[in-house]
Amino acid sequence: MQYLVSVIDDKDNPGSTDRQPAISVFNERLIAEGYWVFAGGLADTDAATVIDNRGEQAVFSDGPFVETKEYLAGVWVWEAPDLDVALALATEASKVCDRKIEVRPFL
Amino acid sequence: MTAIDEAITRAHHEEWARVVASLTKRFGDLDIAEDAAAEAFAIAVERWPADGVPPNPGAWLTTTANRKAIDRIRRENKRDDKHQEAHALYDDNPAEPLGAVDDDRLRLIFTCCHPALAMESRMALTLRMVGGLTVPEIARAFLVQETAIGQRITRAKAKIKAARIPYRVPSADDLPTRVSGVLAVLYLVFNEGYLASGADTDPVRAELTAEAIRLTRLIRVLLPADGEVAGLLALMLLIEARRDARVSGGGELVTLDEQDRTGWDTTLIAEGHELMRERLASGLAPGRYQILAAINAVHTSVQDARDTDWSQVVALYDQLVRLDASPIVALNRAVAVAELDGPNVALAAVDDLDASLAGYHPYHATRADLLRRLGRAAEARAAYDRSIELAGNTAEIAYLTRRRDELG
């Protein structure tokens, strides 16, 4: 079972910026224990572009699809046997990243 | 009720959770298990009056439900060949031996009370899947629309499936937290019955308190060594024992000191006290529910309110404060302090809680009572007014209103 693990930051109350070494150690462990599928930090939401080509002409718009105080700062994809395993890892991840974490299963 | 009706009711009480649990294990799907169990009981209602009650109702119900589940999977597979539940059809595992089935019920309880589900969903799902209450029964008990309860249960089952919430008893490391999560669900169900809120509802909804006790008894059978399970059961029994004495004929709340103690249920009290003696004998440090039960044991061990050992009650609250330093515990402790050290001391302690409990009606009711006892009528009246505004239980509102109007 694969889970999308989103790291959520808050523009008004951001998590600390010195977490990278701890995250790297955590990633090493995810790889060693076979949970790691993918990981990536994301650039600021200002760097996002939304494309809508459902009509006659593609429309590009600057910025994220929705402006919110809370935003996606990075993602993991984990392979885990069930939600309990994913939640236990996410509990650690939240501490390691100093940010909230959302766990959402892939279909 | 005829003998057949009784047999069906008893089978429903005793076997529902077992049937749902064993089918969930076999088919890996709560929906299928729930529907098939409901169908099996419907068939029993139809057939048993004519055919007689089978010698082993549990086995009959499980077999019938299994057959219904397989029929449904066959039907669905015809519509959709690549249906992932196809394997269940070829599952030639023999039926589970009886010992392991009990573990299945525990699995079912832990799944329904999983912390990834919203508390409201956990309560509804537990009452449906473990308790066997129907959706209309649950809706009536919580004063919520049937469609809302139905959706809550459907969404919870969908999340269990989509997010793969495991059907399993948690590991030893997680067990204490997860058990306390299960107990929190049952205690909320009990309190919703005991302190029923809502203008048009009975002040006590006995079907909820009874169901909470029944489910806690079941967990006690499954986890006999857990002190907090025993503590919660004792707590519920000692509160339930006073149920009839707690509301007057006129529908007004009767406080502990004014209750007719001959109206208490001595059998429930004896059982609660026995559980507490057993916990004391264990020599293990008590948790929150055990301390709350011990406080109720002090109250229920005297025939006259004036004989209450208040120093013991305050000592127990001190112990509780060390585990749970919440303002609500501090408020309840102050009520006992009033009896031991007088209303002045208690009022000082209560007034300290204003910032955190200003929206909690028992805070204002407690203050009102202390101010009344101190002869500060105007302040007492204001506090009664506030508590009446915030209270939801009809019997409690009637009691507070009378007390306020008696201030003169």
Image (cartoon, rainbow, N blue to C red):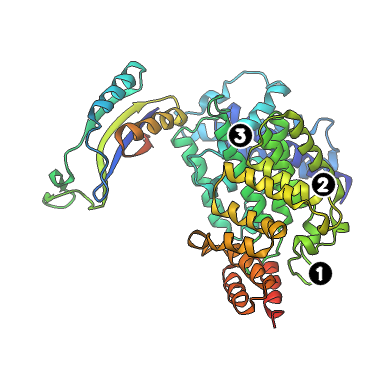
- The mark that comes first in sequence, 3 or 2, is 3
* Alpha-carbon span between mark 3 and mark 2: 30 Å
Residue drawn 43% across and 30% down?
A88
Residue B378: % across, % down: 61, 79
Secondary structure under badge 1?
A: loop
User: Which residue reaches farthest top?
Assistant: A32
Q: Which mark is residue B269?
A: 2
- The mark that comes first in sequence, 3 or 1, is 3
Q: Nearer the viewer, mark 3 or mark 2?
A: 2
Please identify the quarter of the rendering in which residue B366 is found: bottom right
Q: Nearer the viewer, mark 3 or mark 1?
A: 1
Residue drawn 86% across and 51% down?
B1
Residue drawn 35% across and 35% down?
A94
User: Can you say whether B395 is above or below A41 in the image?
Assistant: below
Residue B363: % across, % down: 59, 63
In the image: residue A67, left or right of residue B346: left
Check disc 1: other Cα within 10 Å, few if <14, some if 14-19, many if 20+: few
Q: Is residue B136 something that shows in the picture?
A: no
Q: Nearer the viewer, mark 1 or mark 2?
A: 2
Q: What's the amino acid at mark 3?
A: Leu
Q: Is residue B93 something that shows in the picture?
A: yes
Q: Quadrant of the C terminus of chain B?
A: bottom right
User: Which residue reaches farthest bottom?
Assistant: B408
Check disc 3: other Cα within 10 Å, few if <14, some if 14-19, many if 20+: many
The residue carrying mark 3 is: B108
- In terms of depth relative to the viewer, which is nearer, B368 or B206? B368
Residue B66: % across, % down: 66, 30
Mark 3 belongs to which subunit? B
The residue carrying mark 1 is: B249
Mark 2 belongs to which subunit? B
In the image: residue B391, left or right of residue B238: left
